[in-house]
Image (cartoon, grey):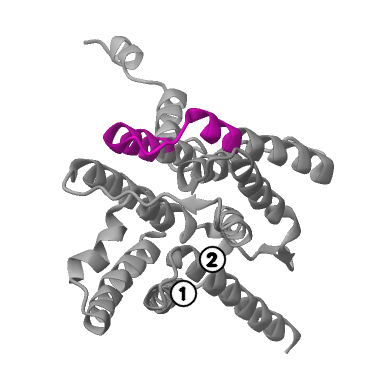
Amino acid sequence: MSPDSATLAAPAPEARSKTRFVFSLENRLVPPTFITLILVTAHLSFGILESYERTAVAIATAIAAELVIARVTYRRWPHPASAYITGISVGILVRSPFLWPYALASLISIVSKYVLKVKGRHLWNPSNLGMSAVLFLAPSTVSLLSFQWGNNLWPMVVIWTLGSVIVWRVGRLHISATYVASFLFFSFVRSAITGHPWLADVAPITGPMYQLFIFFMITDPKTTVRPRWAQALVAFLVGFVEMLLRLNEVVYAPFYALFMVGPSAMLVEIYLESRQRHS
């Protein structure tokens, strides 16, 4: 092969750059694609969706709210990837015979991104706040997805492998790993206290709900503290508070645990940083 033909056969630098971008986490389509994979895998395995319409309402509400609020607030059109993740998370996790909880949870989630800030920083993960709010406000008509993978392990293996690679590429694997280790440890503690079989206490972490919680909610860059050791500590504390809530028979313990621990840690960090700047 001549040098000219070799040059023609080799991909151009621009093409190589585009190829790397498609498969890199700088591409905003990677997280939405992954969460869609969780949805498709879980639905094909167990039929987790109550209806496509309810999930579509959650996604459409989130994207519409994001577009309108960002346009009014910042005079620009935002990328819809973040809103899509919020909407599909709500669509997967919320359970209700009515459409309005899906729309309300998505709307609260998106609005919180623009309203609930301290010194320009978000306090709550949007999806966590939105779903915690509707669960608290309408407990008789709203619940959360509670399916587990059971004996069909291959979907869980695929999701956990891909999820681990993604959070590792963005430097967040230590958060997910710390939470999982904490959950397993506190499962032993709960089992010792209650006398329940350990496998029964640890089984919930195998479900689709926990996949979203572990890989998206607890690792959200905009709602986590900055130092790596502090991120791991917060993940451990979320597991600890979740254990306390479970011992008191709180059904949606992980969501409420993150709802309480995450913003508290953010406020402490904001306060300490403010003191350092003024010292």
Which label is found at residue 190? none
How many neighbours does mark 2 have within 10 angstroms: few (below 14), some (14-19), or many (20 or more)? many
Give the quarter of the image for residue 12.
Answer: top left
In the image, 112: left or right of 75?
left
Q: Is residue 18 above or below residue 164?
A: above
Q: Is residue 116 above or below residue 51?
A: below
User: Looking at the picture, how far across and down is residue 120, in whole percent?
Assistant: 73, 63
Name the quadrant of the N terminus.
top left
Q: Amino acid at mark 2?
A: Thr
Q: Which residue occupies the foreground of this view, 45 or 273?
A: 45
C-alpha span from label 1 to label 2: 8 Å
User: Looking at the picture, how far across and down is residue 44, in whole percent?
Assistant: 30, 31
Name the residue: 54% across, 66% down.
224
Q: Amino acid at mark 1?
A: Val
Q: Which residue occupies the foreground of this view, 172 or 258?
A: 258
- Disc 2: which residue: 224
How many neighbours does mark 1 have within 10 angstroms: few (below 14), some (14-19), or many (20 or more)? many
Give the quarter of the image for residue 180.
Answer: bottom left
Callouts 1 and 2 close, C-beta under 8 Å: yes
Residue 43 lies in the magenta-colored region: yes
User: Looking at the picture, how far across and down is residue 270, in whole percent?
Assistant: 66, 76
- Disc 1: which residue: 234
Q: Which residue occupies the foreground of this view, 39 or 6?
A: 39
Extent of the magenta region: 36-59
Name the residue: 59% across, 62% down.
136
* Farthest residue, direction bottom: 279
Q: Which residue occupies the foreground of this view, 273 or 1?
A: 273
Magenta stretch: helix, strand or loop mostly: helix
User: Looking at the picture, how far across and down is residue 107, in whole percent?
Assistant: 68, 46
